[in-house]
Image (spheres, rainbow, N blue to C red):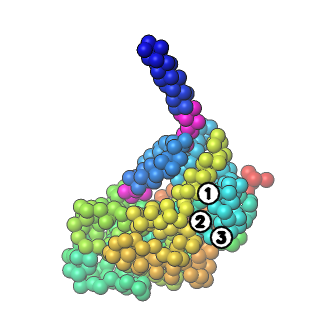
């Protein structure tokens, strides 16, 4: 009896040791990938859910989500990179700021997707500079994830009170848009007609609608030409007429707060606001979306998001695998359906997404139709947009020094500069920075 008990105990001990050993090996083999992330509306629970899915499929990998406030994101990520401690993966607005430190994932694409790199780039790319980097450097430095399009939201209740019917297919002209603003304010339907987000990117959409551009084909900043001055003069006039609250641009009051509280009947922002607007309790009125108004050009800008890996990672294959999984068709579809996002994937964008909600499907139909119409070739559009913001040294200057543009727009609104003087200052400064960039690269 004693001998049998001893044998049982011995077997138990051996099994325990083996189990501990297996657990030790399992934990020892698990790797952690740090994912730097900023929220873009109420998307944090969605990305957390997708990470949980991935970790369940890959128990040997832990994704450490580093959620950084958007206002601090660029600076903190830059500090991490300069300090030699970048994350393994990051969400970003574009590839350009990270072109020298981004991981080239091209070697990992064929084995993961079953496609050649050429095929995959052609099928996947959309609203991004990914094709540019592949064509010029034969590298895939980031994957387009989703794209936000600029959008004009409106308060249906206040429009009805003012006796205005919003367009759903054919855009208003600037004159028609301004006439509607006047009716809203004069009718008392809302204190302000419009609230407009304070970013150079958002204002630039007016620049392109006026037929303007920041840079010409020769790499000279020409934002201060006749078209640019028309765009800024029109924008400033809306403040002068008290159609837009000055505190958003001259101060730092969030533009959305005026729309959310019913103080402004229209809100110039983008599709990233849709999930928040759809959340119960965010607004207490009926809202809709209309095509962006147009001047000389029907221009609709996009705000792409990409996912990047970094060269410094110890786990390039695992980083590439996670990036490819997160941007794969089924996972990207989940992401877009839950957030009302536009897929930055050529094939998926062409096929379209059923968002599973009649109201959201209706809103997205207007936005996607407007985006399609507003990205057709019209004169130098959208080539100027790509040159200004997406590719080449011109985009590097614009993305690096855009605060100067914001400041001079504010100077024009406050009256310390005329629109011509403000844009002259931007052009002079941008051209100086371009000269410095060219000199430093010799």
User: Is the N terminus in the top left, top right, bottom left or bottom right quadrant?
Assistant: top left
Task: Assess whether residue 125 is covered by the magenta stretch.
Answer: no
Left or right: where does residue 26 sit relative to residue 158? right
Q: Residue at x 53, y 71 (%)?
A: 348
Part of the protein shown in magenta: 24-43
Q: Secondary structure at mark 2?
A: loop
Left or right: where does residue 324 sit relative to residue 106? left
Report the residue marked by disc 1: 142
Report the residue marked by disc 3: 122
Viewer can see residue 235:
no
Cα separation, mark 3 vs mark 1, equals 14 Å
Viewer can see residue 301:
yes
10 Å neighbourhood of mark 2: few (<14), some, or many (≥20)?
many
Q: Report the front residue among 408 and 265.
A: 265
Task: Assess whether residue 36 is covered by the magenta stretch.
Answer: yes
Report the residue marked by disc 2: 128
Q: Earlier in the sequence, mark 1 or mark 2?
A: 2
10 Å neighbourhood of mark 1: few (<14), some, or many (≥20)?
many
């Amino acid at each position: 009896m004693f001998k049998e008990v001893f044998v049982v105990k011995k077997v138990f001990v051996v099994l325990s040791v083996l189990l501990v050993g297996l657990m030790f090996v399992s934990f020892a083999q698990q790797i952690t990938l740090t994912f730097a992330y900023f929220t873009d509306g109420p998307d944090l629970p969605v990305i957390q859910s997708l990470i949980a899915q991935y970790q369940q499929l890959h128990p040997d990998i832990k994704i450490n989500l580093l959620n950084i406030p958007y206002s601090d994101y660029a600076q903190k990520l830059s500090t991490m990179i300069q300090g030699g401690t970048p994350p393994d993966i990051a969400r970003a607005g574009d590839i350009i700021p990270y072109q020298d430190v981004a991981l080239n994932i091209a070697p990992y694409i064929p084995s993961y997707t079953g496609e050649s790199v050429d095929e995959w780039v052609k099928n996947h790319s959309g609203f991004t500079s990914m094709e540019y980097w592949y064509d010029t450097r034969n590298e895939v430095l980031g994957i387009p994830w989703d794209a936000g399009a600029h959008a004009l939201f409106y308060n249906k209740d206040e429009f009805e009170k003012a006796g205005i019917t919003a367009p759903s297919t054919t855009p208003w002209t600037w004159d028609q848009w301004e006439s509607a603003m006047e009716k809203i304010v004069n009718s008392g339907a809302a204190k302000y007609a419009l609230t407009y987000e304070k970013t150079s990117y958002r204002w630039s959409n007016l620049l392109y609608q006026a037929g303007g551009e920041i840079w010409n084909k020769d790499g000279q900043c020409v934002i201060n030409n006749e078209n640019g001055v028309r765009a800024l003069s029109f924008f400033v006039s809306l403040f002068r007429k008290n159609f837009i609250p000055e505190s958003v641009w001259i101060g730092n009051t969030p533009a959305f707060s005026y729309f959310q509280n019913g103080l402004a009947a229209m809100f110039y922002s983008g599709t990233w606001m849709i999930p928040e607007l759809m959340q119960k309790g965010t607004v207490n009125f009926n809202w809709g979306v209309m095509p962006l108004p147009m001047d000389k050009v029907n221009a609709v800008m996009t705000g792409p998001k990409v996912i990047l890996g970094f060269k410094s990672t110890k786990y390039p294959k695992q980083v590439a695998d996670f990036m490819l999984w997160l941007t794969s068709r089924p996972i990207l579809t989940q992401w877009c359906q839950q957030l009302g996002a536009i897929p930055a994937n050529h094939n998926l964008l062409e096929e379209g997404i059923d968002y599973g909600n009649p109201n959201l499907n209706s809103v997205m139909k207007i936005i996607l139709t407007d985006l399609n119409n507003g990205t057709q070739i019209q004169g130098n559009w959208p080539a100027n947009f790509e040159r200004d913001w997406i590719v080449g040294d011109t985009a590097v200057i614009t993305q690096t020094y855009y605060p100067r543009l914001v400041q001079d727009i504010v100077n024009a609104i406050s009256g310390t500069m005329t629109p011509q003087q403000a844009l002259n200052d931007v052009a002079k400064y941008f051209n100086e920075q371009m000269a410095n960039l060219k000199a430093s690269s010799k």
